[in-house]
Amino acid sequence: MQELTGVFVIGDTLHEARSLGEIFTRSAGFVVAGFGTVSSVAEFDPGHPDVVVVKTVDSRAALHLEPSLRRLRLPILWLGPSNQSREQHTHQQDSVLPTDATPSQIRAAAAALAAGLHVGPLSNGRPQTEDEFEFALLDPLTDREIEVLNLVAEGFSNPEIAKRLGVSRNTVKFHVSSIIGKLGATSRTEAVTLGLKRGLIII
């Protein structure tokens, strides 16, 4: 059975949070644990998600929100104006993407955070410039991702792939989410189909 990444989604309004949540509900590998708003998040019980995703254009609201979120001891993916986010949200557990990030980038960043990896604009202890910032999904599949994709095509589950490659389940989960995002797929099955069409899978 495929392991799901739990996401708690927060927006400036509940409508915006639900809209953002559709990025995850329409994609295999994720489950939305709940929704909240920037102004009333303290009233919500997020349950036990793997990552919190926040989209807000209000920098002051974000500053007031952060202490409440930090108490949850969960990684946070911030979606907001890049200059605001990079100056204010640089906690080691956090990652930052601009508001115009693509659904694939958002999904892969959330999966990376859930797997304990860092995705964001910090490089060598300093924020990257706009020109330097480039999300990994713009790259082709790595050799490891191609290896994982081929194992998925053979029908192996995430735990089986982890055992076969000698890595953690979270690492495999991140690789699978990254593969799905890079290929523009919505599921493992579609990723395999696209991989076959592009000659990435050895038959």
Image (tube, rainbow, N blue to C red):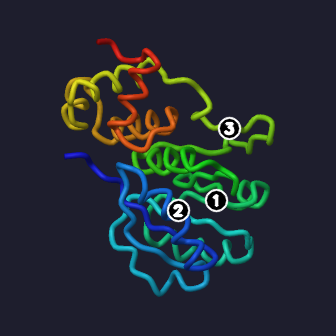
- The answer to which quarter of the image holds residue 191 is top left
Q: Quadrant of the C terminus?
A: top left
Three-letter amino acid code at the position of disc 3: Ser
How many angstroms separate mark 2 from mark 1 (CA)? 8 Å
How many angstroms separate mark 1 from mark 3 (CA)? 18 Å
Mark 2 vs 3, N-terminal side: 2
SS label for mark 2: strand
Residue 169's place in the image compared with 5, above or below, is above
Are discs 2 and 1 less than 8 Å apart at CB?
yes
Three-letter amino acid code at the position of disc 1: Leu
The residue to which callout 2 is attached is 53
Q: Position of residue 11 (x, y in %)?
A: 59, 72
Q: Nearer the viewer, residue 3 or 199?
A: 199
The residue to which callout 1 is attached is 79
Residue at 80 percent of width and 42 percent of height: 130
Q: Is residue 161 left or right of residue 58?
A: left
Residue at the farthest top position: 203
